[in-house]
Image (cartoon, rainbow, N blue to C red):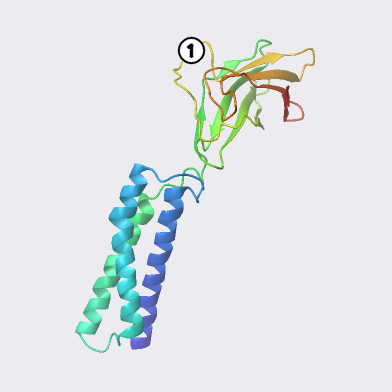
Amino acid sequence: MQKVLKMLYGMVIAAGIVALLWMVLGATAAFQGAVDLVETIILVGVGIPLTGLIIIALYDLLKIIVFVDRLRTIVPVMISVGILLFSFVGYISTSTVGWLTEKVSADETRITADGKYEYHLEIVNGTQRNSSERIYLKNRATGEEQTIKVPIGMGSAYSVAYTAGEEIGWITMKSTDQSNQYIVSTTDQIMPSREDPLKPIHFLVDVEQGTAIEMN
């Protein structure tokens, strides 16, 4: 019986360690971003007590003979309850946005001048090291949707003030003499991490091929 209880005790400790790692991954978006205020509070309020209980439990399990009498059974049980409680709170409080799921910001959807597509720019995991940008397109005739990556390079910068209904969004999309090719240009509504953040960036986008090539 003692061996079974010690094994269960070890499993509780392992669950606590996993919960700690989960919290750290969530707070840093898998080490892709800085810890914000909310995640800091969670780490301090939940992570520190949980770490303390895990350390006590490990010492208890490895250095003390447990589950041999009433006292040496009650204490590990109380510690286990504490570890499981803090682990549960930490697990449900940890955000998965930005690492397991995408954090997407977008400007208002517009229609190309030729009326073929609805479009907007999506900034994925903005302000993180794993950030990226893509154009969302919807064919108005068929309803088909697609995204095309555009290497704008927002980096740690983010979009400037923007409100719904403005005539100018984060990008413009103009048709060319080729039916499936468009010139996509950034506007002064966004500030990428470049030498001249307000200078427009132009891309030749081939909708059929799903490619975007930056133009000089």
Residue 96 vs residue 189, the one in the foreground? 189
Residue at 27% x, 66% y is 82
**Which residue occupies the foreground of this view, 158 or 53?**
158
Q: Nearer the viewer, residue 155 or 81?
A: 155
Q: Position of residue 85 (x, y in %)?
A: 29, 62
Q: Residue 84 appears in which quarter of the rendering? A: bottom left
In the picture, the quarter occupied by the N terminus is: bottom left
Outermost left residue: 71
Which residue is found at the position 64% from the left and 14% from the top?
112
Q: Secondary structure at mark 1?
A: loop
Taking the view exactly as shown, the residue that stands out farthest to the front is 195
Residue 52 sits above or below residue 157 on the image: below
Say whether residue 17 is left or right of residue 178.
left
Mark 1 neighbour class, 10 Å CA radius: few under 14, some 14 to 19, many 20 or more:
few
The residue at 38%/55% (across/down) is 91
| Residue 20 seen in the figure | yes
Residue 90 rendering spot, x and y as whole percentages? 35, 55
| Residue 1 visible in this rendered orientation of the protein | no
Please indicate whether residue 97 sits to the left or right of residue 81 in the image: right
Frontmost residue, 124 versus 109? 124
**Image coords of residue 181 (percent x, y):** 75, 20
Residue 84, above or below 148: below
Location of residue 37 with respect to 44 vertically, above or below: above
Q: Residue at x 56, y 42 (%)?
A: 130
Q: Which residue is mark 1?
A: 166
Q: Position of residue 37 (x, y in %)?
A: 34, 43
136 is higher (above) or lower (below) than 174: below
The single residue placed furthest to the right in the displayed view is 178
Q: Quarter-wise, where is residue 116 in the image?
A: top right
* Location of the C terminus (image quadrant): top right
Inspect the image, locate mark 1, and give the three-letter code of the amino acid beneath it. Answer: Glu
